[in-house]
Amino acid sequence: MTAPGAAPAGLAPRFAGRLLERDLRRGLVAHGYAFYGEPGLGQEEAAAAWAAALLCGAGGCGACRDCSMAAERAHPDLLWVTPDGASLRLAQAAEACAFVARRPFQAGRRVVVIEGAERLTEEAGNRLLKELEEPPAGAVFVLLASRPEAVPATIRSRLRPVVFRPWPAEAVREALRAEGVEERAARWAAALSGGNPGRARTYARDPEWRAAAEGVLELLPRVAAAGPAEAAQWAARLRDWQARGFEVLEWMDLALRDALAARTGGRPRWCDEAAAAALAAALPPSAHETARRALWEARAALQANVNPLLTFEVLLIRLARAGRVGA
């Protein structure tokens, strides 16, 4: 439960909740906010929680009818606008402006959330700008966009910015665990997500991703302990991974880092301890930088559109040679 003037329910500091909490507590709610950040960082959830806080008489208690309706995007004083295809069109901007011009139905404000604000057409942007220049009393606009520069400067200048940044990997892991994701999958997904909980959630729920990641951990120590000729025989295994080329390289890089950590007594970030120890035993420290250089060059080859299967064949041979040289 949240007392009046407290932080909106569901808004942690990682959601820039401190800024919103301060505005609500001081009674200085702006007429327009811009939530910036790449998809998956929680802007939509934060927008729903912020709308509930603005429409709830208790500042977002999470238990009343206003809060539950806002969470379901069904509150009569909340309008949620999503792009019509590739654009946000004039008719949608006009609908939003007409919505805030009417008196609130059951709350003290009217709130409009606009997703994909970088997709506003010129006409829609101009219509919205007029409303932002002279907003009706009690109207609050919340625009969601990937980057500030993607929103027209004239609109951007009239919005209070709230920036959503990547989460720490441990926070992503904890969030996945709270959703019932098994520990190993949560750790892997968090390490690979770049601090993006939405991306991590997608990884953790994808059985094909899990199978490929486990395959990488199984294959790496065997390749590092093999000779180049034997390593080349593993190429057929890589056919299933071609579509995940850059992800596979990232997994390998994380595994190499974990192997080095295991050798120096550190805690693995991605692998479990057994997998990290197995790779550390197969790839001596003197070969570590050579192996990582092979990964960087494989990434550059994929970026240059070199055939993925050929790229991975060469990579496996180089990893096997690194293991032999370092032995």
Image (cartoon, rainbow, N blue to C red):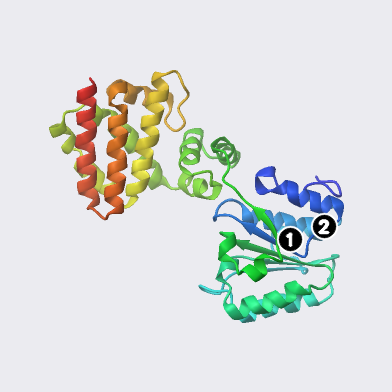
Task: Locate residue 106: give its quadrant.
Answer: bottom right
Question: What residue sits right under mark 1 in the picture?
Answer: 70
* Amino acid type assigned to the residue bearing label 1 in the image: Ala
Depth check: give the residue in front, 247 or 72: 247
What numbered label is drawn on residue 56? 2
Q: CA distance from mark 2 to mark 1?
A: 9 Å
> Viewed as shown, does residue 243 lie left or right of 131?
left
* Residue at (57% x, 62% y) in the render: 149
Dot 2 and dot 1 residues touching (CB under 8 Å) = yes
> Viewed as shown, does residue 241 lie left or right of 86?
left
Give the position of the C terminus as an image quadrant: top left
Secondary structure beneath label 1: helix
* Residue at (25% x, 28% y) in the render: 224
Q: Position of residue 105 (x, y in %)?
A: 83, 71
* Amino acid type assigned to the residue bearing label 2 in the image: Cys
Task: Locate residue 152: give its quadrant.
Answer: bottom right
